[in-house]
DNA sequence: ATGGTTGGGCGCCAA
């Protein structure tokens, strides 16, 4: 089973790229972020025509997440249950019965948090990370395959960016941000790409500005965290870097993870 | 340090 995450940076502006990539790569479940669309304006018919079920959690103008899947989820949760709610659409979770068991998959658009000295934005990011940790903790108790996939807006380690010094005071790389990400992993979650690839220069985002793509001035901020029941079935990971070279690309590329859920544990 | 670009929606904000 192929599960992917992609910050698409506007689903309506990216519909041709999305259709092309779905046809080429044929993922079974896709976690989208930054759809920048209300639910009613999501290009649902175009995606359904390719054989996908669509679940959205959108809002006007910004943010918005979605789950595309080749089979219908049994249950969908919109918004993180923990804490006092959210007026920003950043979380959607689906439970799928596939190939013999329940698989819980979330699409996460973690707050950017910049500017880091902002009295609202950075504290909101850290609070949101703690809410995610609490929710992940309760999901872990279910002891089922859990896949928390999305744009975390976190550079975990210096070798996850081209120029660490340039990010030193950025909300994506501050020590508190990285510590909060490690607290998630400490629950027993495995970061799929790093579990399978220790190379440097592995990036998922290249800024539109200043020729970042041409210089390979990227950062790795799109991640997939796996419960032990999912990590046991992890087969391979890939970063679909070629998509960044297409016409009208998103500034992020898809991260694809292949699982073997076919045989009994 | 600054400036560089894109999407959404029509102001300029968010990234």
Image (cartoon, coloured by chain):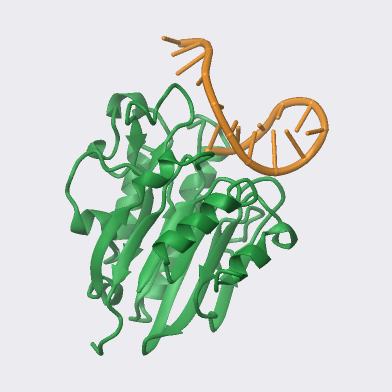
A160 to the left or right of A45: left
Quarter of the image holding residue A255? bottom left
In the rendered image, what is the letter of the chain coloured green?
A
Residue A233 in picture, x, y percent from top left: 25, 75
**In percent of the image, x 53 and y 80: which residue is there?**
A73
**In percent of the image, x 57 and y 51: which residue is there?**
A16
In the rendered image, what is the letter of the chain coloured orange?
B
Q: Between residues A160 and A237, which one lies in front from this camera angle?
A: A237
Can residue A128 be seen at all in this image of the molecule? yes
Quarter of the image holding residue A2? bottom left
Residue A20 in picture, x, y percent from top left: 50, 55
Q: Vertically, is B6 above or below A199?
A: above
Q: Which quadrant is the N terminus of chain A positioned in?
A: bottom left
**In percent of the image, x 26 and y 55: which residue is there?**
A193
Residue A21 in picture, x, y percent from top left: 46, 56
**In percent of the image, x 44 and y 44: which residue is there?**
A252
Q: Between residues A107 and B5, which one lies in front from this camera angle?
A: B5
Q: Between residues A91 and A19, which one lies in front from this camera angle?
A: A19
Furthest residue in direction left, as rendered: A198
């Amino acid at each position: 089973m192929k599960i992917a995450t992609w910050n698409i940076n506007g689903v309506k502006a990216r519909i041709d790229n999305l259709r092309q990539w779905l046809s080429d790569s044929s993922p079974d479940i896709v976690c989208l972020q930054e759809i920048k669309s209300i639910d009613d304006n999501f290009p649902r018919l175009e995606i359904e025509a390719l054989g996908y079920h669509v679940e959205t959690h959108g809002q006007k103008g910004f943010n918005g997440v979605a789950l595309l899947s080749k089979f219908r989820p049994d249950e969908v949760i919109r918004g993180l249950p923990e804490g006092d709610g959210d007026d920003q659409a950043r979380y959607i979770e689906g439970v799928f019965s596939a190939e013999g068991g329940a698989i819980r998959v979330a699409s996460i658009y973690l707050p950017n948090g910049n500017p880091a000295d902002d009295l609202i934005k950075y504290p909101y990011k850290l609070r949101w990370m703690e809410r995610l940790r609490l929710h992940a903790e309760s999901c872990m108790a279910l002891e089922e395959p859990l896949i928390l996939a999305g744009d975390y807006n976190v550079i975990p380690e210096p070798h996850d960016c081209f120029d660490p010094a340039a990010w030193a005071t950025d909300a994506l790389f501050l020590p508190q941000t990285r510590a909060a990400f490690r607290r998630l992993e400490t629950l027993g979650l495995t970061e799929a790409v790093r579990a399978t690839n220790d190379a440097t220069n592995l990036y998922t985002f290249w800024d539109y500005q200043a020729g970042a793509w041409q210089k390979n001035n990227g950062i790795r901020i799109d991640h997939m965290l796996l419960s032990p029941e999912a990590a046991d079935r992890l087969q391979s990971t890939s970063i679909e870097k070629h998509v960044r070279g297409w016409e009208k690309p998103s500034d992020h590329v898809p991260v694809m993870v292949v699982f073997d859920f076919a045989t009994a544990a």
